[in-house]
């Protein structure tokens, strides 16, 4: 369960989030949708305790991220990049992360297997391609077998097979009762897996609800999204 | 405890740290030899030969600290992984310092022994070991605030090797407040070393606690 | 070629660290002259400082950290990653896509570096020497133009030395550490001159004799020879760096 309550943030004098509130519930895939620079990543970073909000609260299972004990066993997060130092091998990276949360070393090999990187375990992160970096990031998120998954643009850089794989993986995770929150600017991608959708634009939540409600009278989620976010600019490209 | 273990693992799997240690040891041997050779040629350089090589090799330890801390912020954005895994930042900062000190101590002891023992300065070995360890922590703390390796190295080496000697030349007597006085005279500079390192670590902890990652 | 040099100049001057090098390098020597003025006056009055021909010129050596930083980051900035998204990506990839000929790229980089450092050295030398004349004019003779030119050359060659080493190591920390330690008061090179006379031919020891008269060295080298020795070092290291740069994958 993720609860974001009236979160506001100002960065170098520009207001980037205005009273953002929403929930992501267990057993459902929640899509966090918005154009580039709308505030998706900023919201997720606040949720994950990386940045501080000026006001408001962001809670995971009722607690702020920074107060979680062994956080990786509760939340798995994927932000841009792999989050690994370029000189370290994939396995060495996963092992120190595992150690930090008291997880056994074998978890490193298990998650490498899950994301299909077993044969690259001894490669250094700096030699990874974009797609492999994303897989390593995902492996890191899965280390603690968490009940909540927070993923920022997870399909970025993945090939078609990788995209299908992650789609199935996230659906299955939700079916097992996990909370899945993922951000994207790819409407088509979200429309296929999201149960609930939150649309954010220029730091404000524009609409939220079930996929069908948000799509509303529009033909597709994409139409609804463009109508909601581009309305005041009056232009499209 | 998990945090310290994770931080130790991180340090042990960084190739740049191993390379820094090797280069530092090589340089230390060369400088120690140079001092001994100069001495035997009857050329006095004027410093205490047991401690003088440390004046140079401390650079290796500053760099060691800088690389250990700056590696978090280098390409790949490892700091996010670190903060996601260990969100309690004060805890994290303490664990980082502890792990780095544990790793540096044997390296520092070996360095101190090689440069003090040939010059009959065995009594200085413990002090020199402590000094080099503190210097490494200071380097790490500064890099933790600056967050980038090259500027941190320029800042630290500029202060230690250019500004420091200039200040010392102006007023040798009152220069015991400098962080590296202990490298020349441990009995006089010990307090300064400890205070500088602790202040820098505090600043780094505050910076980590306050800033967005 | 002109546009390539302009691009490299723009790239260099767009780096915040380059400005640290520029400001630090330009201000250090004049500030030291200013701060040391009372001590220098007292030393001249007391008769402990008899040879005043190096006054001002000697202080120029302290600002060398500037050209060192510039020389290193011209190369090291190319090897830093462009962002967290792709830890393998480096600015050099972009650079080489824009300028595929590595020889032309190196030539442009070298030219840009020489231009920036020579300009910086000229400004610093003018400021430092003018200040010395104003403060100690009656004791310090105006240095011959050839010696001032040699000092500017020394700065430029030092930057090129840093640049060449960084081309070889592809990493800024190693050359910076080496060079900064070696520019301290008792440099490693100076220490080596106490061990072997050959050390007098190390680039920094030899190079300084281009413009400093009363140096404490085992072998006195004439200014012109000194310049040639230092240039030979720089050319040799640059050649190695260029060959490696040409052969290595990005």
Image (tube, coloured by chain):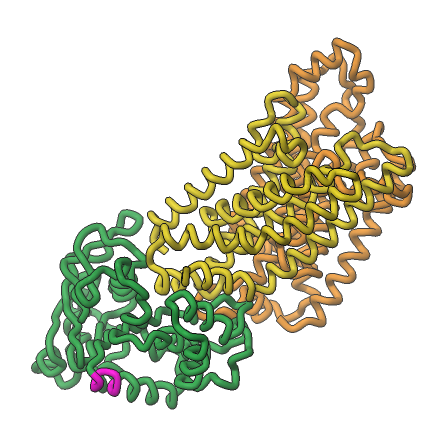
Chain colours: A green, B yellow, C orange
Give the magenta part as a residue range: A171-176
Quarter of the image with the N terminus of chain A in it: bottom left
The relative height of residue A221 versus residue C221 in the rendered view (above or below) is below
Of residues B81 and B110, the one drawn nearer to the viewer in this rendering: B110
Quarter of the image with the C terminus of chain A in it: bottom left
On the image, the x and y values in percent for residue B93 come to 41, 51
On the image, the x and y values in percent for residue A109 come to 45, 81
Residue at the outermost top position? C45
Residue B143 can be seen, yes or no: yes
On the image, the x and y values in percent for residue B35 come to 81, 40
Q: Is residue C221 left or right of residue C98?
A: right
Number of numbered labels in the structure image: 0
The relative height of residue C95 versus residue C236 in the rendered view (above or below) is below
Residue A37 can be seen, yes or no: no
On the image, the x and y values in percent for residue B197 come to 50, 40
Q: Is residue A227 left or right of residue B25?
A: left
Of residues C93 and A166, the one drawn nearer to the viewer in this rendering: A166
Q: Residue A61 lies in what quarter of the image?
A: bottom left
Q: Residue at x 11, y 83 (%)?
A: A212
The relative height of residue C141 versus residue C156 in the rendered view (above or below) is above
| Prevalent SS, magenta region | helix
Q: Residue at x 53, y 61 (%)?
A: B11
Q: Residue at x 62, y 55 (%)?
A: C172
Q: Residue A135 lies in what quarter of the image?
A: bottom left
User: Is A175 one of the magenta-colored residues?
Assistant: yes
Q: Residue B47 lies in what quarter of the image?
A: top right
Of residues C66 and A61, the one drawn nearer to the viewer in this rendering: A61
Of residues C69 and B38, the one drawn nearer to the viewer in this rendering: B38
């Amino acid at each position: 369960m993720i609860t974001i309550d009236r979160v506001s943030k100002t960065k170098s004098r520009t207001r980037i989030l205005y009273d953002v509130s929403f929930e992501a519930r267990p057993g459902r895939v929640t899509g966090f949708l918005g154009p580039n620079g709308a505030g998706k990543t900023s919201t997720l970073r606040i949720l994950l305790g990386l940045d501080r909000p000026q006001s408001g609260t962001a809670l995971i299972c009722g607690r702020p991220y920074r107060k979680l004990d062994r956080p990786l066993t509760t939340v798995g997060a994927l932000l841009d990049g792999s989050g690994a130092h370029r000189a370290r091998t994939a396995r060495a990276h996963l092992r120190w992360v595992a150690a930090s949360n008291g997880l056994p070393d074998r978890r490193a090999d298990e998650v490498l297997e899950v994301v299909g990187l077993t044969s690259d375990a001894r490669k250094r992160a700096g030699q990874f391609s974009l797609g492999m970096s994303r897989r390593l990031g995902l492996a890191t998120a899965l280390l603690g077998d968490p009940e909540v998954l927070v993923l920022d643009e997870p399909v970025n850089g993945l090939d078609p097979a990788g995209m299908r794989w992650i789609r199935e993986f996230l659906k299955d995770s939700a079916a097992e009762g996990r909370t899945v929150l993922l951000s994207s600017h790819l409407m088509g991608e979200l429309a296929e897996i999201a149960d609930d959708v939150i649309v954010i634009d220029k730091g404000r939540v524009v609409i939220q609800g079930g996929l069908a409600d948000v799509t509303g009278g529009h033909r597709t989620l994409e139409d609804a999204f463009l109508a909601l976010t581009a309305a005041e600019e009056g232009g499209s490209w | 405890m998990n945090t310290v273990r994770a931080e130790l693992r991180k340090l042990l799997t960084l190739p740049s740290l191993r390379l820094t240690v090797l280069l530092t040891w090589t340089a230390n041997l060369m400088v120690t030899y140079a001092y001994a050779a100069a001495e035997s040629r009857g050329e006095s350089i004027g410093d205490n030969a047991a401690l003088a090589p440390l004046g140079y090799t401390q650079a290796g330890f500053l760099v060691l600290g800088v690389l250990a801390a700056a590696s978090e912020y280098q390409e790949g954005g490892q700091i996010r992984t670190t903060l996601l895994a260990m969100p309690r930042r004060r805890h994290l900062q303490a664990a980082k310092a502890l792990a780095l000190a544990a790793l540096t101590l044997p390296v520092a002891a070996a360095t101190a022994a090689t440069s003090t023992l040939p010059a009959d300065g065995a009594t200085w070995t413990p002090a020199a070991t402590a000094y080099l360890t503190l210097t490494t922590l200071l380097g790490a703390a500064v890099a933790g605030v600056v967050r980038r390796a090259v500027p941190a190295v320029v800042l630290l080496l500029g202060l230690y090797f250019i500004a420091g000697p200039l200040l010392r030349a102006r007023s040798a007597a009152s220069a015991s407040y400098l962080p590296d006085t202990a490298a020349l005279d441990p009995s006089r500079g010990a307090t300064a070393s400890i205070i500088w390192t602790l202040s820098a670590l505090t600043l780094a902890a505050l910076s980590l606690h306050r800033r967005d990652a | 070629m002109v546009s390539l040099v302009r691009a490299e100049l723009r790239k260099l001057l767009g780096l915040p660290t380059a400005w640290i090098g520029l400001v630090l390098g330009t201000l250090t020597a004049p500030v030291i002259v200013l701060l040391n003025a009372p001590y220098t006056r007292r030393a001249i009055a007391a008769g402990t400082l008899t040879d005043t021909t190096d006054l001002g010129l000697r202080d120029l050596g302290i600002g060398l950290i500037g050209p060192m930083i510039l020389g290193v980051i011209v190369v090291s900035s190319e090897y830093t990653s462009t962002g967290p998204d792709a830890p393998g990506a480096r600015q050099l990839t972009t650079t080489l896509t824009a300028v595929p000929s590595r020889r032309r790229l190196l030539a442009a980089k070298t030219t840009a570096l020489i231009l920036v450092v020579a300009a910086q050295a000229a400004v610093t030398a003018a400021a430092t020497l003018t200040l010395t004349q104003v403060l100690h004019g009656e004791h310090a003779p105006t240095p011959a133009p050839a010696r001032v030119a040699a000092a500017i050359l020394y700065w430029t060659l030092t930057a090129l030395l840093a640049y060449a080493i960084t081309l070889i190591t592809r990493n800024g920390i190693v050359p910076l550490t080496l060079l900064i330690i070696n520019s301290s008061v008792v440099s490693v090179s100076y220490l080596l001159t106490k061990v072997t006379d050959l050390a007098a031919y190390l680039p920094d020891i030899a190079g300084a004799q281009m413009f400093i008269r009363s140096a404490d060295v085992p072998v006195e080298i004439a200014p012109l020879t000194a310049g040639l020795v230092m240039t030979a070092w720089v050319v040799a290291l640059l050649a190695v760096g260029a060959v490696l740069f040409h052969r290595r994958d990005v």
